[in-house]
Image (cartoon, rainbow, N blue to C red):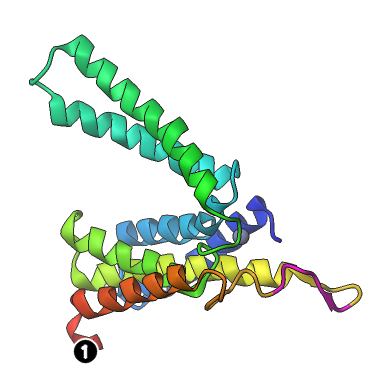
Amino acid sequence: MANFQTHCTVAAGGSIVATAVCVQSGMADHTQGLLLISLGTLAGILPDIDSDHSIPTRLVFNVISFAVAIGSLFALLGQVNLLYLLGISLISALFVRYIAYALFAGITEHRGLFHSLPAALLFGLSTVSIGIHMLGWSLHFAWLAAAFVSGGYLLHLLLDEIYSVNFMGSTLKKSFGSALTLFTRSSWLSYLLLYAIVGAGFYLLPMPNHLI
Ligand SMILES: [Zn+2]
């Protein structure tokens, strides 16, 4: 299994090259290019949020708890007194960072659902949805960003597979085949749900004209 640094480096390298192509061909401007590099690199470490206590897991939960604290501050601003407001945002941040994190770590299995092809597609589709509905991105850029997210994610899965090949003896480690999973019988219901959500996403999300 590739380590955090390797995933980061490869994802950043791949994203920079892909972004250069996009900017050169006029598909994105320089500001969008920076965003694409960040998204591709982040996506390259995202699958390992299923490994408890990994750097990506802690990073993601720190960011979410910070966002929840800020979100609750803004949502309740002017409705309750300041001390109460600070208390609520602190408690909600701590809840996400410790209780939600512990629950998440308890239900996710490393190299389970998160290390699969449909998960890569799901994160890409979520990017399209958040981009057009919440961030006001154009349809074209939202799908381009999704390609970077799914691409960075897939690069991670591919690296994990490559690292499970023992080059010295040309044998395969036990982890081979556990990263780029399409389906496992033991968690068939979860996979079925995942494919159903991905299918619905492709069906419901608007496509840029030239892709239809
Ligand atoms: Zn991994």
Residue in the foreground of this view, choosing between 25 and 196: 196
Residue in the foreground of this view, choosing between 93 and 155: 93
What residue do we see at 33% from left, 75% from top? Answer: 196
Q: Is residue 69 above or below residue 33?
A: above
- Percent across and percent down for residue 170 are 86, 79
Image mark count: 1
Relative to 206, is 34 on the left or the right?
right
Q: Can residue 19 be seen? A: no
Label 1 beta carbon within 8 A of ligand 1:
no
Q: Main secondary structure of the magenta part?
A: loop
The quadrant where residue 157 appears? bottom right
Figure quadrant of the N terminus: bottom right
- Percent across and percent down for residue 71 are 23, 34
- Percent across and percent down for residue 110 are 60, 56
Q: Mark 1 packing: few (<14 Cα in 10 Å), some, or many (20+)? A: few
- Disc 1 marks a residue whose amino acid type is Ile
What residue do we see at 36% from left, 32% from top? Answer: 66
Q: Is residue 171 magenta?
A: yes
- The residue identified by callout 1 is 212
Q: Is residue 111 above or below residue 75?
A: below
Q: Can residue 208 be seen? A: yes
Q: Which residues are magenta?
A: 170-176
Query: In the image, ligand 1 is in what quadrant?
Result: bottom right
- Percent across and percent down for residue 202 are 27, 78
Q: Is residue 103 magenta?
A: no
What residue do we see at 54% from left, 53% from top? Answer: 50
What residue do we see at 72% from left, 67% from top? Answer: 175
Figure quadrant of the C terminus: bottom left
Relative to 40, is 1 on the left or the right?
right
Residue in the foreground of this view, choosing between 101 and 9: 101
Please tell me whether mark 1 sits on a helix, a strand or a loop.
Answer: loop
